[in-house]
Image (spheres, rainbow, N blue to C red):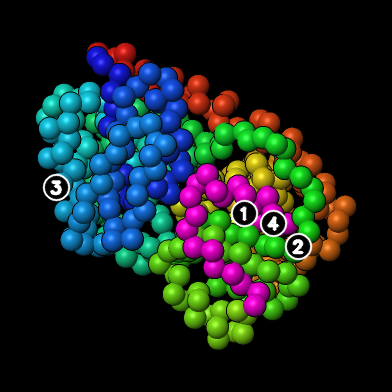
Amino acid sequence: MSKSITCCVSNDLTNDRRMIRLCNTLVDSGWTVQLVGRELPNSKPIPQSWRFKTKRFKLPFKRGYLFYATLNIRLYFYLLKNTAPVVLSVDYDTLSAAARATAARKKRLVFDAHEWFEEVPELIGRSKVRDKWIKIARKYLPSTHVRFTVSKGIAEKLNERYQLPFDVIHNFPKLQDPEPSAVRDQNIIVYAGVLNKGRGLQEMVMAMHELKATLWLVGEGDLSDELRDLVKREGLIHKVIFHGKVAPEELDGYLRQARVGINLLSRESASYEYSLANKFFDYVHAGLPQVCMDFPEYRRMNEQYRVASLVGDLKKYSISYAINHLLDDRNYWFTYHVSCLEARKHWQWEKEAPRFLELINQVESSD
């Protein structure tokens, strides 16, 4: 079997840090790699520095049933023609096309769960849609040869529901030099990621009334317009700065200027409750103490290295108290900063990559 793999996602490609990291690692290991996704009207060009091939579908729908249907039809026929013997499917929304195409062409199928898909906030109260995704997972997951996800908690939940083993590949960044400085001249609070429902963003904006600091929102999403309106209504334009999307390689530069990172999540979503987000480790690698939820995975990581102040809810005063403690007590902040510097030596992609390659090579070498 040739070392060639096609990786399939439903999103735009240029800001998917996990997939960029995985694809680069495969290329470094001698694989020929193609990353397939979607193209939106505002999609940025693929960087010329990327060493793997890409394919983006222009689709007539942006969301909902028709979007997923057209995506999977296009993806299915594309994979039928594609010669790569291994396909990596990301999340349930690419799984049916990938599973049917690999079965038809007798290819090997790898599955990467970036989240607990049927438990995301967008499906709360939508039991019929949720049940359809579960049905897809039950039908096609058994045809996958290797499965992995982002956290131990999600791996355990998926194993419990589908009776299939899931390995864990963490979203550790690559270790960057120089080591982050403790000198942070301004009280900047930063959120890095998609501006979507269930991420405590409205609550964070309201908490800014209690904070002598500036909030940077680095990213865009479904709540972009709503958050901008909220900032205007609350008279916080001078305290909340929208930086929009930034290239993955530029993110660390923003984080190293800040004094507190934000990773707030709703308890309504079981996917969030067991998540372990990219931004948690991005903050650590920037030497940036953070405020995040007292959820099982973050608690587990914080027991190894105390890098985060954990909060139990999204109440305005819970958030503002935790942030103010970090902003006002320099010794307290510095203790977390030093712990981040130690943690980044261990939570780095260079140590996680061999585990990922072992899983992929196991598929490649199997009959």
Which kind of residue does numbered mark 4 sit on? Ala
Dot 4 surroundings within 10 Å: few (below 14), some, or many (20 or more)? many
Q: Residue 270, how many percent across, how many down? A: 47, 54
Q: Give the Cα distance between marks 2 and 3.
A: 50 Å
Q: Which comes sooner in the sequence, label 3 or label 1?
A: 3
Point out which mark residue 258 bears: 4
Quadrant position of the C terminus in the picture: top left
Q: Is residue 160 visible?
A: no
Dot 3 surroundings within 10 Å: few (below 14), some, or many (20 or more)? few
Q: Give the Cα distance between marks 3 and 4.
A: 44 Å
Q: Residue 255, how many percent across, how many down? A: 64, 52
Q: Is residue 135 left or right of residue 24?
A: left
Q: Residue at x 72, y 51 (%)?
A: 289
Q: Which residue is mark 2?
A: 186
Point out which mark residue 254 bears: 1
Q: Is residue 71 left or right of residue 184?
A: left
Q: Residue 129, how many percent across, how many down? A: 27, 60
Point out which mark residue 345 bears: none
Q: Residue at x 80, y 51 (%)?
A: 183
Question: Which residues fall within the magenta stretch?
Answer: 238-261
Q: Judge by depth and name the residue closer to the eye, 270 or 330.
A: 330
- Disc 4, disc 1: CB below 8 Å? yes
Which kind of residue does numbered mark 2 sit on? Gln
Q: Is residue 352 visible?
A: yes
Residue 51 painted magenta: no
Viewer-nearest of discs 3 and 4 = 4
Q: Which residue is mark 3?
A: 73
Compared to residue 322, the image places residue 146 above or below, namely: above
Q: Give the Cα distance between marks 3 and 1.
A: 39 Å
Mark 2 element type: loop
